[in-house]
Image (tube, rainbow, N blue to C red):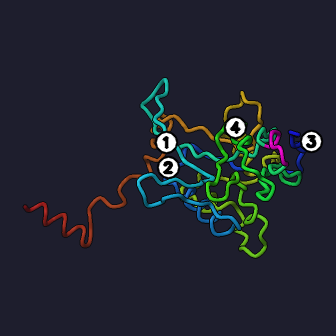
Amino acid sequence: MFSMTALPDHTDRKLGLVIDLDTCVGCHACVVSCKGWNTQSQDSPLSDQDPYGADPTGTFLNRVHSFEVTPEQGPPQLVHFPRSCLHCEDAPCVAVCPTGASYKRTEDGIVLVNESDCIGCGLCAWACPYGAREMDAAEGVMKKCTLCVDRIYNDNLPEEDRTPACVRTCPSNARHFGDLGDPESEVSQLVAERGGMDLMPEQGTKPVNKYLPPRPRDAWEGETDVLAPYLEPVAEEPRGLLGWIDRTLGKL
């Protein structure tokens, strides 16, 4: 008989990500580090099919999409949009799971999959409005972002490494990790200061992860004016080797 999996009434914390769309450069470092960590650290790695063939496919827990956006005012902007599980408070993927394999932890709010109980029915992927779940073709089970639960609580790692692999590797500091249930946390303050947004709020899933909107390009151009006094040349006349090259070229 089909049964639905219960969600906790509350969670002690709301661990999640805040992703800054203003500073994400679309380098895919987060994708590579996520794939690497979750392939080497799990009993069932993220598989690839025909990786060097004409039609390669594979399982990824984090993906980055790029869109050209034309605002009402100002020039078009290229926005890079990372996408992974949002660890929703009202997670539909958990509610539809017939075996209890998908569940939300009460201690930190992280949504996980117990792969030994997963039957690969795909109901969770059908229910997720964000496309955050992927069927692993080799294992026949659903995979999803775990917020690197095996890193963030690992006392054998240096303290600076006890954060999701995607956050640790981001070169532009576009990804932030913390407790979004604590209004005093760094991530909560970022959301408040920058107007952090839910993805597709009309779905009613109450995602924990938030996105910081990209700033209008006009604002960037205005900020450079503030720095202009500090960008004056250090020396009026080039000196040393540079000065010699400048004088030599001037005689040609």
For the point 60% across and 38% down, the residue is 213
Task: Please provide the residue range marked out in magenta.
Answer: 94-99
Labels 2 & 4 near each other (Cβ < 8 A)? no
Q: Tag 3: Cα neighbours inside 10 Å, few (<14), some, or many (≥20)?
A: few
Q: Amino acid at mark 3?
A: Asp
Label 3 to label 4: alpha-carbon separation: 24 Å
Spatial separation of the CA atoms under disc 1 and disc 3 = 36 Å
Q: Residues within 10 Å of mark 1 (few under 14, many from 20)?
A: few
The amino acid beneath tag 4 is Trp
The image position of residue 242, as x and y in percent, is 25, 68
Disc 3 to disc 2, C-alpha distance? 37 Å
Mark 3 or 4, nearer chain start: 3
Dot 4: element: helix
| Callout count | 4
Q: Which residue is mark 2?
A: 26
Q: Earlier in the sequence, mark 1 or mark 3?
A: 3
Q: Tag on residue 126? A: 4
| Residue lying at the far left of the rendered structure | 252
Please tell me whether residue 53 is drawn above or below residue 2 in the rendered image.
below
Residue 160: image quadrant is bottom right
Question: Foreground: 71 or 52?
Answer: 52
| Secondary structure beneath label 2 | loop
Question: Which residue is pictured at 75% across the width and 54% down the height?
Answer: 178
Mark sitting on residue 9: 3
Point out the tag, 4 or 1, that comes first from the N-terminus. 1
Whether residue 186 sits left or right of residue 31 in the image: it is right
Residue closest to the far front: 1
Pick the residue in front: 40 or 126: 126
Q: Residue 176: horizontal and vertical position, in percent?
A: 67, 53
- Assess whether residue 20 is covered by the magenta stretch: no
